[in-house]
Amino acid sequence: MKEAFYITTPIYYVNDVPHIGHAYTTIACDALARWHRMLGKRVFFLTGTDEHGEKVQKTAVAKGLSPRELADQVVANFQGLTPALTISNTGFIRTTEPRHYASVQDLFRKSLANGDIYLGDYEGWYCVPDEAYWTALQLADGHCPTCGRPVEKRKEPSYFFRLSKYQKPLLDYYRKHPAFIRPESRRNEVVAFVEGGLNDLSVSRTSLSWGIPVPGAPGHVIYVWYDALTNYITGLGYPTPTAEFGTFWPADIHMVGKDILRFHAVYWPAFLLSAGIAPPLGVFAHGWWTVEGQKMSKSLGNVVDPYEMVRKYGADAFRYFLLREVTFGLDGDFSEKELIKRANSELADKLGNLLNRSLGMLGKYFAGVVPAPGPSEPPDAVLSNCGRETVPAVAAAMDEVAFHKALAAIIELVTKGNEYVQAMQPWSLAKDPGKRARLGTVLYNALEASRVAALLMAPFTPTAAQKLWEALAPGGGPVENARIDRDGAWGGLAAGATLPKACIVFPKIETGA
């Protein structure tokens, strides 16, 4: 097993405000980062902001600001996602930092020196919102094929990257690393695109000044995507040889929206191969969210503000819904009504209920002291077997980046726990002094199901999971320091420990919220 894990979000463009898309990617990365830490790995988790390019320059001018002033104002909106969404990122990169200028220029110089970057003239159709050039054949009814907005004809001197040279190396890399692009449907799209032939890529601009200068070429700035993608190695200290770079590169997963997959799965590995740097090990492209069946847009006023969702429902419920609701990789539909329904039915009524009814009876019948379990009977074995099967099921789902499967497995364990309590009726056992040992076994098993669930929920609902863990493993320290293999073993609940009488971590959300 690789002992280190490096995961990244795309860096977020500062002429935007954080919305559900930013939250989704960041939360997904956080869940994976937390999971791998609980496997005992060293983890580096990078996020940040993309602050150069024509969009930022134009927005800044319209607001009477310099591009840097605009970036400095807006970056706080994205930095604030870390505490608001309970994100555990290791680093935060801004592309306006001096370390990033050094990184981008070093990468550029390497390809310039080996002939993979050359000076020429570029003429084509340019989409300002996407910062992308298109040929006439690529246009969709005269508009940008990605976003559908108008394009403008431009001609300027430009440095080009010999992307055409990397068609075979890229296809070879995809073949040798079948899990490099996920999900599979996205991999097929990228392979087909590269097999169709690659044109050399314009990697500098003379039409704007807001960017990283091309070394030794006054008037040229480096293309914003070349600049932006390089953040993933800047964040580890490149071009300085650092312990972080040696430990964590190549990245295990670049998590991206499906609209920017081509940049990450085609351009980025080609830039790295040219510079003699290993490409990343994986790129995962997730889907988009609609809002109650409609495309999210400012004009419709239906942009989902993650800060508002956290204020109304808490970070744990918001995180849970986004990762539970949809098969990761496919598109999803966001609805506050559905968020409330899931939070109430699964978090409050199932997970919260199992723990609280068990703690309540433990307090009532055993003064809060965990009894040692007695001999196992068939219903006990059904529950304990489910508990033992849940840990590898969640692990397999996380390897697959299938959060919905992982969460479904945890909820299945909790459901089985509640069914077990209903069937065993500890309140009836308590009436017969001769069944006290059996009562102790039943409550032990119910609490142990809650404990395993609490451990497994930690990557998804970290704040609530910590409260659950404190209730079930008093003195056990932060749940994030627990280990899946060690602490996930059935029977880890300490007999003789004194537990609280209640632990309300998932209060019901009132529908009038």
Image (cartoon, grey):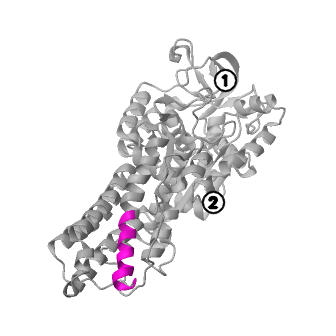
Q: Position of residue 71 (x, y in %)?
A: 75, 42
Residue assigned mark 1:
120
Q: Which residues are magenta?
A: 353-368
* Closer-to-camera residue (63/250): 63
| Nearer the observer, 179 or 317 | 317
* Outermost residue, top side: 141
Q: Is residue 94 above or below residue 186?
A: below
Most common secondary structure along the magenta stretch: helix
Q: Position of residue 70 (x, y in %)?
A: 77, 39
Asked whether 153 or 337 is in front, the reply is 337
As drawn, which residue projects farthest toward the left? 378
Q: Position of residue 314 (x, y in %)?
A: 55, 54
For badge 2, the amino acid type reads: Pro
- Neighbours of disc 1 within 10 Å: few (<14), some (14-19), many (20+): few
Which residue is rendered at x = 51% and y = 42% of the image? 256
Q: Residue furthest right?
A: 64
The residue singled out by tag 2 in the image is 241
The answer to whether 142 is drawn above or below residue 160 in the figure is above
Q: Quadrant of residue 381?
A: bottom left
